[in-house]
Structures are given as C-alpha cells and as structure tokens.
Image: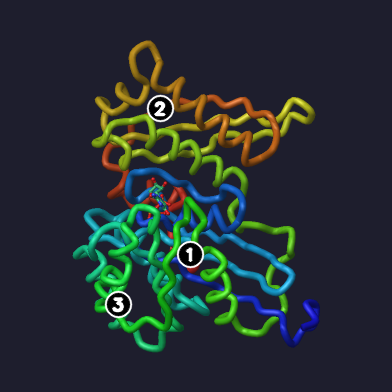
Amino acid sequence: MNETSPTSYRAGYIALIGRPNVGKSTLMNALMGQKIAAVSPRPQTTRQRQLGILTLPEAQLIFMDTPGMHKPVHKLGEYMNQVAEDALKDADVILWLVDASVLPTPEDLRISERLKSINGLPAVLLGLNKIDLLNKDLLTERTDQYQALYSFEQVIPFSATRGDGRDELMQALISRLPVSEALFDPDQITDLYEREIAADLIREAALLHLRDEVPHAIAVRIDEYTERGEEGAYIHATLFVERESHKGIVIGKGGEMLKKIGSSARQEIEAMSGRRVFLELKVKVNPNWRNKPDALRWLGYYRKKDGQ
Ligand SMILES: Nc1nc2c(ncn2[C@@H]2O[C@H](COP(=O)(O)OP(=O)(O)OP(=O)(O)O)[C@@H](O)[C@H]2O)c(=O)[nH]1
C-alpha cells in the first residue's frame, strides 16, 4: 500500500467518552506520546473539550477528550455534560472507555441510556481499560457485563498505563476513520493554546496536593504569560477558590502548600513547553463561582461553538 496515496489516507475525529476517572486523559496522553491532557486520581479533572492530534504515515487521528459524563449539580456540571454530547455528534467514531477493574456502575448505565437516546451515532467501540488491575480469568466475564450495556461494534481490552492492547486499539480506530487527507497540519498536536494547557497543569497540581473538599472549586486564570527569550517564560496565574477558608488551605501554613503546587506545576509546564519557566501563583476568593455564568465565561467555560 502506498502510504502517501490520497485514496488510502484516513483522517477523522474520535470522541473519547466515559464516566470520570476511567483513564480518558491517560490514554490520550499515552497515544500522543506526550502530556496534553490533565490527569489526576480525582474524578472530573477534565473540564473542557480538547483535541489531541496524532499524525501518522497512514492516518491522522483527532482525539476529542471530553469531560466525564456525570450528574450535574451546578452550572459548570451542565456545561461539562453539554461539551461531551457535542463531541459525540461531531465524531467519526466513539470510543467509550470503562474501568475493567470494576463492575459497571450506575453512571455507566446512564451513559448507555444516553447513547441509546441519540439517533444516528457513529460506530461505538468499547475500550476496556485498566486490564492490568484485572485477574485474567475475569476478563471474559467482565467483557460480557459491559457488553450487556450497549451493542458495541467491537470490544478492545487494553491498559493505558502499561500499554497492553494499544496496537489493536489503534488499528480498530484507524479502520473506522473516513478516507480523507489530513485535516490539521502534521506539526499541530492540539487546539489548546500553551497558556490554556499551563492553566490545566496548575489546576492538576492543585488537585494532586489538596484534600477532598477543596479541589473541584478551584479555577485557574493565567494573568500573564510572557516570553523572555533565552531565559524562558514568565507566568503569573491566579487560583480562584469559593471560600475564604479554602484560600487558607490552598496557601497553607507559611505559604507551604502554594509553594508545593507551584513547584510541581512549574516542572510540568517546563516538560510540556521544553523551556525554563518562572511561575508565580496567587489565590483569590470568588464566592460560588461555579454557579455564576459571568465567572464561568471569563474563566473560559463557555461553549465556544454557540458564542454563549
Ligand atoms: N492501573 C491503571 N490505572 C490507570 C490506567 N489508566 C488510567 N489510570 C489511572 O486512573 C486515574 C484516572 O485517569 P484520568 O486519565 O485522569 O481519567 P479521566 O477518565 O480522564 O478522568 P476525568 O478527567 O475525570 O474524566 C489516574 O490515576 C490514572 O493514572 C490503567 O490502564 N491502569
């Protein structure tokens, strides 16, 4: 097969869906060979849709990493669910990821009901992730349990962290993309600007270091992102929390916590951007920001498509 032939090249969109914490961002980062999506052990790390563009000699795979589908409890939650649904309609193939190490949950059931309620969906593949945590004898049984949820075109067991099944997964996806020329420049790997990625990495560092009740109420705004030539980049960012008490927790005793968050985030941003970074963080209270449409808008959580 001639790899450059326009009649054999494939390109298209792959929607990654699944309940929070099943490994969508981990898979995307692993396939891309670099970190472009925030990953953390806490659910709902991914808030906005973002593209990961992987250009290979035979195909261009455009991954849409979507926020985990969950029951919305505030406006931000509603926004996140809407983003996920939009991605489904735009996709050429849907990859529904589940955590094979556990039984299907009520949230998985909700997703299956949602998919069944949308007409004219593209092919839906089941990605059984985290098989490294599953006893091999259980794989068939677990596959049956998930297949009972939806009539999938194909089931692919894999492990995003260990790499098992990754080639099969890639082949399954590529074979379902339309024959097309590349849709993005081969050098482009994401549609997010570096500063948006940096904001996500700072939020991720905060999620990793903080205790349960605070993290979801944190938003990050990049106030300044300046190139300083050979010296690297200077970034000033504000972490918004909902309560005065949370501000104290984020800053920590003698500023220790904020220092830790800043130091982890700086290392991640340096790895992502390939240059030195000077990072300054500040914490501000914006009460109940998750329920304020104007705050959501200036923090970037509006639906770009509708211009809302
Ligand atoms: N053991 C194991 N852990 C995994 C695997 N894939 C992902 N994880 C872990 O699962 C957790 C959640 O991963 P994420 O990639 O953030 O999950 P997500 O589905 O993007 O989550 P949201 O952003 O909340 O929607 C992280 O701690 C990952 O390291 C896997 O194949 N095996």
Residue 168 location, x and y as percent? 53, 71
Residue 194 vs residue 85: left or right? Answer: right
Residue 124 location, x and y as percent? 41, 79
Local packing at callout 3 (Cα closer than 10 Å; few below 14, some 14-19, many 20+) is some
Residue 178 vs residue 305: left or right? Answer: right
Residue labelled 3 has its Cβ within 8 Å of some atom of ligand 1: no
Gap between marks 3 and 2 measured at Cα: 46 Å
Residue 232 vs residue 225: left or right? Answer: right
Report the mark closest to the observer, 3 or 2: 3
Q: Which of 224 and 198 is in front in this view?
A: 198
Q: What residue type is labelled 3?
A: Gln
Corner quadrant of residue 62: bottom right
Q: What residue type is labelled 1?
A: Gly
Corner quadrant of residue 257: top left
Instruction: Mark 3 or mark 2: name the one nearer the start of the chain.
Output: 3
Residue 113 location, x and y as percent? 25, 77
Report the mark closest to the observer, 1 or 3: 3
Residue labelled 2 has its Cβ within 8 Å of some atom of ligand 1: no
Q: Which residue is drawn at 30% across and 80% down?
A: 150
Secondary structure beneath disc 1? Answer: loop
Q: Nearer the viewer, residue 41 or 155?
A: 155
Residue at mark 2: 283
Q: Residue at x 67, y 73 (%)?
A: 59
Local packing at callout 2 (Cα closer than 10 Å; few below 14, some 14-19, many 20+) is some
Residue 271 vs residue 120: left or right? Answer: right
Residue 220 location, x and y as percent? 45, 39
Q: Which of 223 and 131 is in front in this view?
A: 131
Q: Which residue is drawn at 32% across and 57% down?
A: 134
Residue at mark 1: 307
Q: Which of 5 and 250 is in front in this view?
A: 5
Tell me, for residue 147, which label it has, or none: 3
Q: Which amino acid does label 2 sit on?
A: Val
